[in-house]
Amino acid sequence: MTKAVRSKFWHSDGRRLSGLSTLLLLLPFFAVIAFVFIYPIAQLLLISFLEPHPTLDNYARVVDNPVHARVLMRTLWTAALVTALSAVLGFPVAHYMSRTKGALAALVAVCVILPLWSSVLVRTAAWSFLLQRNGLINSALMALGLTSQPFKLLYTQSAVVIAMTHVLLPFMILPIYGALRSIPNDYARAAAVLGATRLRTFLEVILPLSLPGVVSGSLLVFLTALGFFITPALLGSPQEMMISTLVSKQIREILDWPFAAALVGVLTVFVTLLAIVFSKTLRFDRLMGSAS
Amino acid sequence: MKPPTDRGSLVLGAYVYAVLTFIIVPLVIVIPMSFSQSDYLAFPPTGFTLKWYAEYFDSRQWRAATWLSVQVALLTAVCASLIGTAATYAMVRGRSRFVALFQILLIGPIIVPHIALAVGLYLFFQTIGLSGTVPGFVLAHTVLTLPFVVFTMAAALGKVDANLEAAAMSCGATRFQAFRFVTLPLVLPSLASGALFAFIISFDEPVVSFFLSGIRQKTLPRRMFEDIEQNLTPVIPAIATLLIVLSIAILLGGHALRSRSKTQSSAG
């Protein structure tokens, strides 16, 4: 018995790799992840607990200081708001995608997928053109006579919420689309035959079955939004920081590494725990799969 | 489904197209702005000029940043494809406790916020002298792009019948030869599409690049970030237009590769 197990480790039978070759093929991956992913983050976490001396003070400062506590609350609230907006905007689009065929379907798919593969900086820059004093939105409002003075739209939390929703919307649409597409058309037809109205069919058949996609998309958007950096850094107000912009400020201007490390620790642990709790619902491979 | 004729469907359709407009307009708007003659970014754009494109191509700083990003993205695509394909092959064909560990670790770079990795690497790479170097950027971007290469390759390798390799090996081929001459040709389109996506993710990656860039070694996204933050010159719409064209080209390329791999696997 032991001999058989050992020989499986050393030899392959043609269809399966031996244990040793499996490990050797995985080794470069493990090396890169250990060296460039686990080690740097573990080092940060250590600093947050050990500097200037073994202490929890760095974490106490995250919650005790009212300014920092407000940054945490703003980050959570912004991420939740962006998630809710993405769901409200994204669900009907996903539903439409799953019910459309041919050239129109391709056009809608391009509208959803092209932004996903274009630079976050391009999309953020586009919003700063749109929202600035003499940008498209202010010009349009003034041309329509809705206002005589341009609004201050740029460098506000609203600008951050709008642009983050824009950037993260595909992450909501694609998982919902994946869930909706896997519902057989017969279900809706069966409900109709049994006398259900279209609204009732939607509420009692389609919506419950698409819920895994909604949960998956919401988590993806929420988790990504919590750590978002580029958009708040470029469109937000310096008075209304998010956790990532606060981290950047601590490192680049104040050089307070232990505190920055504690902020990163709070963010990373929170996001990882949420991802572990919901690991069954999060289907990352769907993002690529449904892009085809 | 019945064609949408009633009022509810019309309202829903209008809502969907309004959302699609919200998605696509910010991307489209930069294109006319890149041809505007005005020296400051105002709407509507005036006149027609190519001077902002000329400014981008003539500027040594922009060219240096672009060249750095191209180098990093090419090397990242190569590293992520090699490491990712080896690991995916082990996952699909192998047996080992480590496969489960691999599948857990693979999700890490997607879950953990990029700002956390960026700050950790900023500290670590400074102590070992990798900050602002091509190998430093490539290592960081390889970690970020590996999951996408693995997802693409897992879908492709999963479809290749293990008996094909077993047959080749029973005819005297080594395991490597069986992979090289039987499996690899079948998954090559997916490998190319994974590499393409690794390239564009690396080329556009802003957060890690932001922290790893030195004073002289700046990637294109880092240079763009500074320009948007400080003065928002009309060169930005010109670069944005070029980047959108690049994204479209890569999406079309990836699509062509995937449809090729589909016809191949259905033929084989």
Image (cartoon, coloured by chain):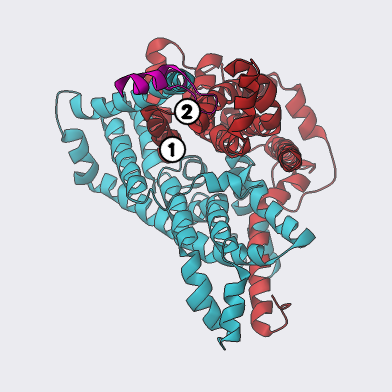
Chain colours: A cyan, B red
Is residue A55 highlighted in magenta? no
Q: Residues within 10 Å of mark 2 (few under 14, many from 20)?
A: many
Report which residue position mark 2 lands on: B94
Residue A25 place in picture, x, y as percent: 49, 20
Quarter residue B134 falls in: top right
Q: Chain of mark 1?
A: B
Label 1 CA crowd tier, 10 Å (few <14, some 14–19, many 20+): some
Q: Pick the residue in front: B6 or B48.
A: B6
Q: Amino acid at mark 2?
A: Gly
What residue is at 50 percent from the left and 49 percent from the top?
A155
Task: Report the residue at 51% width, 30% height from top.
Answer: B93
Mark drawn on residue B107: 1
Chain under label 2? B
Number of on-image labels: 2
Please state the extent of the stretch shown in magenta in the rendering. A1-21
**Residue A134 in view of the camera:** no
Q: Is residue B56 left or right of residue B8?
A: right
Locate the N terminus of chain A and report the quarter of the image it occupies: top left
